[in-house]
Image: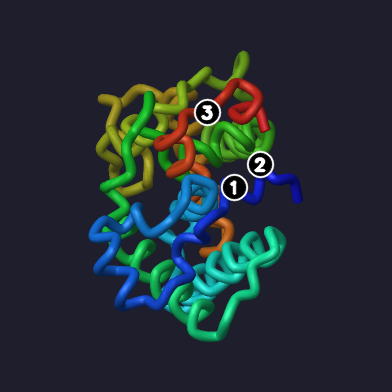
Amino acid sequence: MSASSDAELEPYHGLEDHESFARQSPTMDGRFHQIQLAHLQSRRVEYLFATAEQKKEIALSASNHLVMLAEKAGRQVSDVERTGMTKNVREWFSQKCRKKKDIPEFGPRYTGRSVFAQSNKVKIAARQRQLFQKRLGYEAPGESPDVELDEIDTALGDEEEDEDGLPDYGGKAPTLLYFYKKALKFEWDLLTDEDRLLYEKRAAEWREHGATEEEKAR
């Protein structure tokens, strides 16, 4: 490792004895260098959506990574310092990841379902046509409605449905948008809890950092 990289890690913040180091650095971020904070920040969204057991694993993994950085820079890390790092990392996540609503939002209010819809347009359109034809007996005209990401969740569930499961349009046939909503809900409900969680995590990342056109197209 270069001398400049070594300098970035000195004096290996976070490694000192947990109790004494906490008194020297009253702020949580003050216990870590910027290079260490960057790694912790990169795992914040993952931690927010993790189970209690997964949170322990994430904190331990992050702590081990920071210790590895110090060792690569030539630091001999003692067992006491390793334990101190683990405690400091756990406290950092505990303080910085208290509530999902604390994540700053950027642009549209992305949700897991809206991100799923953006990534699965072809599948949802096919299901929309299937539901349309099954209910009305003929193929849907034209193309699927072009629904913006931030409109998807606010649009869902707007119409009141009658006892047959169709919205009350005063005797008129349901719209293409209605069948789009039905198709999206149908496909979303087919996902496993793990898959839905992945989309919720991506939505949280987009709310925090924004999403590029390339990411939206994935």
Q: Compute the Cα span from label 3 to label 2.
A: 33 Å
Labels 3, 2: front one: 2
What amino acid type is highlighted by mark number 1? Answer: Ala
Does residue 2 lie above or below 137 as drawn?
A: below
Q: Give the left or right position of residue 158, taking residue 43 as reference.
A: left
Which quadrant of the rendered structure holds the C terminus?
top right
What residue is shown at x 52% (from left), y 18% (from top)?
146
Mark 3 element type: loop
Residue closest to the eye, 141 or 38: 38
What residue is shown at x 23% (from left), y 60% (from top)?
26
Numbered mark located on residue 211 in the image? 3
**Residue 23 appears anywhere in the view:** yes
Labels 3, 1: front one: 1
Circle 3/circle 2 CB separation < 8 Å = no
Circle 2/circle 1 CB separation < 8 Å = yes
Using the rendered view, name the quadrant where residue 28 is placed. Answer: bottom left
Mark 2 element type: helix
- Near mark 3 (Cα within 10 A), the count class, few <14, some 14-19 or many ≥20, is some
Does residue 163 lie above or below 124 as drawn?
A: below
Does residue 184 lie above or below 37 as drawn?
A: above
> What residue sits right under mark 2 in the picture?
4
- Near mark 2 (Cα within 10 A), the count class, few <14, some 14-19 or many ≥20, is few
Which comes before the other along the chain, label 3 or label 1?
1
> What residue sits right under mark 1 in the picture?
7
Image position, residue 191 (x, y; %): 57, 57
Residue closest to the eye, 162 or 41: 41
